[in-house]
Image: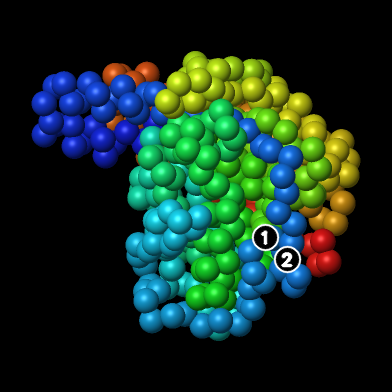
């Protein structure tokens, strides 16, 4: 599953490439497009922490090499050099613990593409929180042996990478352990779900145009916001394989076997001990919102006329949209603002 905006950089570079190389690039990007599974393995909280990572102290001060604005960094996990971008807004008050959002790009995307496409830096400026934009290896995330792409084929542990990344940033900056959040689109949303299945690192998840695949037998309660277009053919709203699915075979395996989106929301309502949802509709946007135990919430936002996209995101280059059959971002909703408001209202409950 790939966000439509993920192709902007590739298409721009392709103008300087021979036609044969352009065709090869486009074929690779299309092949990379999406999703997969959640394994039974769980990384429970280390003593004093809320995930598999070492406990954050909450009283660190910014290191000299963490400037205001956007900066690039690397981290070695499982013998692999991993890269990421960190956005530290000037509005973040680092004299006290601050929230952290991890934004996971879709297949064929990058951290830089996600930073440019979805508006999280402007949201961080207004909200005073930190944002991480990590890079998947070969522009994809492994969420199981059958998805997605080369990282899945090569057995990359992206859960280990993200949890170690959160811990590393928590040692450099005063991240509030109760206000760590993860969001992602498509393949990135798959990894976001896997992270809340396999760890207790995050207080809430915001998934866009994605699903939960594979096994997730005993997740801990977590607030969940899921945004999905009814016309999505890559991650079908009705569940099951999408148009990028190859049944998890070949050099770039992609297997999508998620449930219908309303069933996924119902499952999380059960996990979180929620009441019945309240349903409201405003034009093409329908919200089913449930209040849950310990102040958590589960909300499903459905956009009737939208496909596989990030609502309110940067428009796709027209050439890429036409050549690669990409869905335009819906203008009926600002997903970034909606997700941040949900996150801000749902920190990790005390003792939870």
Residue 19 image point, x, y percent:
14, 22
Specify whether 189 is left or right of 23.
right
Q: Position of residue 283 (x, y in %)?
A: 60, 27
Q: Is residue 184 above or below residue 95?
A: above
- Tell me the crowding category of disc 1: few under 14, some 14 to 19, or many 20 or more residues within 10 angstroms, Cα based: many
**Foreground residue, 68 or 141?**
141
Q: Residues within 10 Å of mark 2 (few under 14, many from 20)?
A: few
Identify the colour scheme used: rainbow
**Relative image position of residue 323 (x, y in whole percent):** 29, 19
- 70 displayed left or right of 38: left
Q: Residue at x 51, y 44 (%)?
A: 156
Q: CA distance from mark 2 to mark 1?
A: 6 Å
- Image quadrant of residue 18? top left
Give the number of the disc on residue 253: none
Do callouts 2 and 1 mark residues in contact (Cβ within 8 Å)? yes
Residue placed most toward the observer, 250 or 70: 250
Image location of residue 81, percent across then percent down? 40, 56
As drawn, the label of residue 52 is 1
Which residue is rendered at x = 49% and y = 25% of the image?
253
Q: Confirm whether residue 50 shows in the render.
A: yes
Residue in view at x 79 percent, y 49 percent = 220
Q: Look at the numbered disc 2 and give the secondary structure of its residue.
A: loop
Q: Which residue is labeled 2 in the image?
A: 46
Secondary structure under tag 1 reads: loop
Q: Work out which quarter of the rendered image holds the C terminus and state it.
A: bottom right
Q: Residue at x 45, y 21 (%)?
A: 250
Which one is earlier in the sequence, the residue at label 2 or at label 1? 2
| Rendered position, 121 above or below 151 | below
Q: Is the residue 28 above or below the residue 53 in the image?
A: above
Which image quadrant is residue 23 in? top left
Residue 345 visible from this viewpoint = no
């Amino acid at each position: 599953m790939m966000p439509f905006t993920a192709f902007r950089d590739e298409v721009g570079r392709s103008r300087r490439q021979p036609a044969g190389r352009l065709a090869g690039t486009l074929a690779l990007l299309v092949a990379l497009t999406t999703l997969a599974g959640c394994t039974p393995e769980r990384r429970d909280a280390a003593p004093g922490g809320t995930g598999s990572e070492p406990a954050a102290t909450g009283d660190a001060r910014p290191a000299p090499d963490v400037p205001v604005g956007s900066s690039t960094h690397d981290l070695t996990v499982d013998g692999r050099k991993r890269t990421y971008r960190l956005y530290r807004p000037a509005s973040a008050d680092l004299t006290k613990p601050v929230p952290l959002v991890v934004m996971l790009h879709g297949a064929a995307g990058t951290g830089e593409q996600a930073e440019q496409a979805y508006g999280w830096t402007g949201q961080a400026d207004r909200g005073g929180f930190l944002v991480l934009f990590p890079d998947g290896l070969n522009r994809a995330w492994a969420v199981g042996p059958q998805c997605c792409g080369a990282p899945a084929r090569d057995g990359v542990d992206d859960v280990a990478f993200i949890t170690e990344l959160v811990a590393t940033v928590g040692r450099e900056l005063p991240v509030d352990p109760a206000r760590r959040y993860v969001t992602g689109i498509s393949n990135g949303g798959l990894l976001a779900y896997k992270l809340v299945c396999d760890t207790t690192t995050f207080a809430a998840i915001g998934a866009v145009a994605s699903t939960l695949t594979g096994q997730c037998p005993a997740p801990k309660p977590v607030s969940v916001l899921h945004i999905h277009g009814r016309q999505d053919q890559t991650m079908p709203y009705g569940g099951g394989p999408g148009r990028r699915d190859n049944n998890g075979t070949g050099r770039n395996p992609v297997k999508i076997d998620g449930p219908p989106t309303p069933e996924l929301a119902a499952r999380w309502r059960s996990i979180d001990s929620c009441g019945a949802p309240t349903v409201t509709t405003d034009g093409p946007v329908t919200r089913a919102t449930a209040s849950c135990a310990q102040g958590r919430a589960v909300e499903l936002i459905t956009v009737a006329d939208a496909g596989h996209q990030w609502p309110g995101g940067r428009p796709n280059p027209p050439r890429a949209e036409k050549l690669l059959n990409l869905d335009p971002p819906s203008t009926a909703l600002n997903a970034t603002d909606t997700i941040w408001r949900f996150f801000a209202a749902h920190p990790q409950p005390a003792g939870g």
